[in-house]
Image (spheres, grey):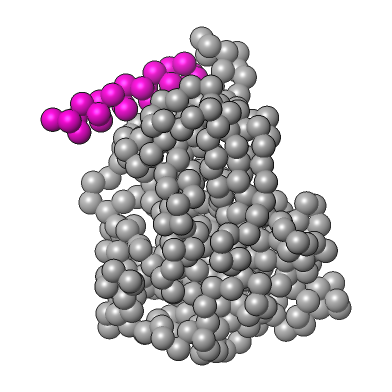
Amino acid sequence: MKRATVLGLVFAAAASAYTRGTVEGSLGGTPLYWATADGPRFQVAQTVQADLRNIDNRPVIAPGSDPVAALQGALDAWSSASVSALRLGTLARASATLDPFDGRNSFVFDDTATIRALTDGALGVTVVTAQTNGKILDADIVFNPNLRIGNNRGRIRPREPSIRLICRTWPLTWSGARWAPAQAA
Amino acid sequence: MGEPYEAPFACALALAAAAVALHATTVERLSFGQVVSQSSAIVHGTVVRSRMAWDADKVAIWTHYDIQVKSSLKGRPGPILTLSEPGGEVDGKHMQVVGAPRYEVGEEVVVFVAPTATGLLRTCGWGQGKFAVRASDQTPSGRVVRSGVGAVTLVEPAGARLTKAEAADALDGADLEAFLGRVRAEVRSQLIGGSR
């Protein structure tokens, strides 16, 4: 099967999922939306690199990998999808850490007690914060620093899980054609 | 396939599509025995109260659920067990973590909880440790348990693959009394095994 065909199948499946998944994308029935006109921008900490270790000195990111390129690849996968109206842009390097209310969308690889509590048992989680009117403040993708899921040998190769986690920063697509009104907001 | 995150391009994207079409938070599928062994407490009870609050560092919002214990199957939780899940609304700010189990006040449940790094008790294995009790005319007791695995994608652990029957979520739909009996038997079995 050609790569383009595979991509088409991938995002067709994803698109069908979004249009019916309204529960997670609402706030007491109020749809969540982005107020930015050109889609969310993401950042990742300068310290994120191959063989990143947690506070127990266990590897979190696989040695020899390029996590920034992998994360950019995940963003590009969505931006290039024919069903996607969003263009997620270039990943910024910053002092990204977990602050779900700082207005910055971050990939987070820190190791703190709070992050361990949030991600315990999962590969990673998407934390979305919003005002009561549904306006999204922030969407952070937080990886488990104490990864024990066995089928990636306890280390993260971030591209594929990021593709999945990014989709949860788009509640506008879960509730249908929410993107157009959000642009006008 | 044992290495989904290191698979070739097409295969990996196909996996991603399957997961995306379901849910985004990826969690290791636990056996029933693992859910029991990883839990510090297991109770059958009713959710009587919920409240939302910032954590100590004011980084995240958590919802805390008080469960009035009808019977304790493991541990010594006292008459009220408080479990916490990330997400909620405080000071006009809303936070949600996709896949975190939710409970309703008045809901009857059998829950398996484990401590987190911050000391809060969470549902074991995300929704894998939540079983909601529902009425049913299909079983002897008239009540069944429903697995709380919701908005997560369960992945198989490396090495030893679970059979369907071994997985905790396979107990979805079990008769309540039979389920409680199985929990007690597993707890007893692990206690005996652990004391050997």
Q: How many marks?
A: 0
Which residue is farthest top? B140
Quadrant the C terminus of chain B occupies: top left
Residue shown at 53%/59% (left/top)?
Answer: B24
**Is residue B194 found inside the magenta-colored segment of the image?**
yes
The picture quadrant where one finds residue B135 is top right
Question: Taking the image as drawn, is residue A44 in sight?
Answer: yes
Question: Taking the image as drawn, is residue A1 in sight?
Answer: no
Which sits in the foreground, B71 or A25? B71
Residue shown at 39%/18% (left/top)?
Answer: B181
The picture quadrant where one finds residue B46 is top right
Magenta region, main secondary structure: helix
- Residue B4 versus residue A63 in the image, above or below: above
Residue shown at 25%/29% (left/top)?
Answer: B191
How far across and down, in percent of the image, does residue A55 sit? 33, 71
**Is residue B130 found inside the magenta-colored segment of the image?**
no
Which residue is farthest left? B196
- Residue B121 versus residue B104 in the image, above or below: below
**Magenta span:** B172-196
Residue shown at 55%/32% (left/top)?
Answer: B80
Quadrant the N terminus of chain B occupies: bottom left
**Horizontal side of residue B74 vs A136, given as left or right:** left
Which sits in the foreground, B10 or A85? A85
How far across and down, in percent of the image, does residue A84 sit? 66, 74
How far across and down, in percent of the image, does residue B143 sit? 56, 18
How far across and down, in percent of the image, does residue B122 sit? 49, 46
